[in-house]
Image (cartoon, rainbow, N blue to C red):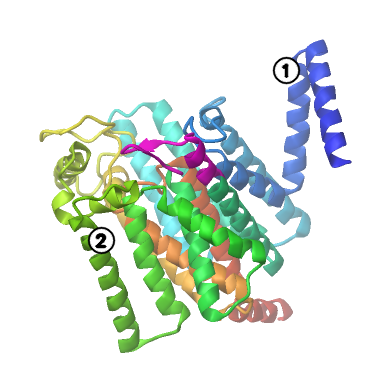
């Protein structure tokens, strides 16, 4: 019946567009959709995250329509920005309708507000430094997803059922990405890296797949049952993750796996140090063993071989990263407090092995310092540290086992992403991962508000 209704509705829309024109039809449809999403902000949030994860920004893969979705429609706003607008409006109206007090994001509130202040200062510095106003608007819209979504998530995900639904949706999206990524490899529809077709080049899918793997690992160690379809997703996610050939994600995953094993097994003191040391030693030994193999033919092993220290300057792209850092550090030496500001390119004082966009920096810490000044760097590190700490608190104190597993997976994923950002800048820079990062912080904040000590404190305050 649903298929018949959907097909009939689509047919009526096509006929109507032929009779009176697409604009006259689509505008009322868009208005009705916006009204529905505003009335149902949780569905709007799910739509925002679903579109962000499902549709890649590159014109490759099984759904090669990404560029049209992520291109500005009007005033620098993309369809995702408009979706975020419906989520924000719907959340505000729900708070008014239910007479609930707005929530902060717990321990992460102050660093996120500090980051917002640093970003405003970075925009001002960039404007007076000659940055294009249009580019500054685009950067502001992109950063708004990081600054707004944590508060939205904390206010929408108020009950355990909402938190579990978020986890189920994330696992479902990971299953979709794993299957479509592997199909893209089999069909040759993905990116080509070093002669091999990869599953995903952009970071979001790899990060999502990694967190699902970490969550399943934590659940296995703590003997927490997971739905069967999630267990079937894990091997597919692992294979899709490996076939992405992202070296930084591989190393970050190795560290995150060791970390999750230590925390989930509740080992402490010397035992934890021993487990961590042995695990990291095994990872290093495996990397060096692969690196010494001179007759490796597998694209995966060839990619792993490039992690060997003497291979780090073997390509022009790797040498460029070192050249870039030398120039960026010199700019920071000259502007240590304010940096250069948003959308002001760094100066190429030293030779470069390649030419790339000089608004970008391959180290997240340096990007925040260069663009938002020293306050931006401090706020960025502060936010990351407290986000991981809050997720660990949820893992330790929350009473729902699935939410505990999700929190540990989030903590491991955040640590892994922090390691990845030592070789690339994603948070606040890459639009899709920025949206997912903000939503994850909102989920962590929502779970933090559900800890027993905070629930009892609020109940006591309401009765006084």
What residue appears at the point 29 percent right and 48 percent down from the top-left corner? 303
What is the C-alpha distance between the residues marked 1 and 2? 57 Å
Residue 217 lies, in percent from the top left, at 50, 70
Which residue position holds label 2? 287
Left or right position of 153 against 415? right
Q: Nearer the viewer, residue 23 or 323?
A: 323
Q: Quadrant of residue 457?
A: bottom right
Q: Are marks 1 and 2 in contact (CB under 8 Å)?
A: no
- Stretch of the chain drawn in magenta: 180-200
Locate the N terminus and report the quarter of the image it occupies. Answer: top right
Is 191 in the magenta? yes
**Helix, strand or loop at disc 1?**
helix
Left or right position of 55 against 13? left
Of all residues, the one furthest to the right in this rendering is 1
What residue appears at the point 55 percent right and 27 percent down from the top-left corner? 68
Residue 332 lies, in percent from the top left, at 19, 46
Which residue position holds label 1? 23
Q: Quadrant of residue 38?
A: top right
Of badges 1 and 2, nearer the viewer stands 2
Q: Nearer the viewer, residue 440 or 335?
A: 440
């Amino acid at each position: 019946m649903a298929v018949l209704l959907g097909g009939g509705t689509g047919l009526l829309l096509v006929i109507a567009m032929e009779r009176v024109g697409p604009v006259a039809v689509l505008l009322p449809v868009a208005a009705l959709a916006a009204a529905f999403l505003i009335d149902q902000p949780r569905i709007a949030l799910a739509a925002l995250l679903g579109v962000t994860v499902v549709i890649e920004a590159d014109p490759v893969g099984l759904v090669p329509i990404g560029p049209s979705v992520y291109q500005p429609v009007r005033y620098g706003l993309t369809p995702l920005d408009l979706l975020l607008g419906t989520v924000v409006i719907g959340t505000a109206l729900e708070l008014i309708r239910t007479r609930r007090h707005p929530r902060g994001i717990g321990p992460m509130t102050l660093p996120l507000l500090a980051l917002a202040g640093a970003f405003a200062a970075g925009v001002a510095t960039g404007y007076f430094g000659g940055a294009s106003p249009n580019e500054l608007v685009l950067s502001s819209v992109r950063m708004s997803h990081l600054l707004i979504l944590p508060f939205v998530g904390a206010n929408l995900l108020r009950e355990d059922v909402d938190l579990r639904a978020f986890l189920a949706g994330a696992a479902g999206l990971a299953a979709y990405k794993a299957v479509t990524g592997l199909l893209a490899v089999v069909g040759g529809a993905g990116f080509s890296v070093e002669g091999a077709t990869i599953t995903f080049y952009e970071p979001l899918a790899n990060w999502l797949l990694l967190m699902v793997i970490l969550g399943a690992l934590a659940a296995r160690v703590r003997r927490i049952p997971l739905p069967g379809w999630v267990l079937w997703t894990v091997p597919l996610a692992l294979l899709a993750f490996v076939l992405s050939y992202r070296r930084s994600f591989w190393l970050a995953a190795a560290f995150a796996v060791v970390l999750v094993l230590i925390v989930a097994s509740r080992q402490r003191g010397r035992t934890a140090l021993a487990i961590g040391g042995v695990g990291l030693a095994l990872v290093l030994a495996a990397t060096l063993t692969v690196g010494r193999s001179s007759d490796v033919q597998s694209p995966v092993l060839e990619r792993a071989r490039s992690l060997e220290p003497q291979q780090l300057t073997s390509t022009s792209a790797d040498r460029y990263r070192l050249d870039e850092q030398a120039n960026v550090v010199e700019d920071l030496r000259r502007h240590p407090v304010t940096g250069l500001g948003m959308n002001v390119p760094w100066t190429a004082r030293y030779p470069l092995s390649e030419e790339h966009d000089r608004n970008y920096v391959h180290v997240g810490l340096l990007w925040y310092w260069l663009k938002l000044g020293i306050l931006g760097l401090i706020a960025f590190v502060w936010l990351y540290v407290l986000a991981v700490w809050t997720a660990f608190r949820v893992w330790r104190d929350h009473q729902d086992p699935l939410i505990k597993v999700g929190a540990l997976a989030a903590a491991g994923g955040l640590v892994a992403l922090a390691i990845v950002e030592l070789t690339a800048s994603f948070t606040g820079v890459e639009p899709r991962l920025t949206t997912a990062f903000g939503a994850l912080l909102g989920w962590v904040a929502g779970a933090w508000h559900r800890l027993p000590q905070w629930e009892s404190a609020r109940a006591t305050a309401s009765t006084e």
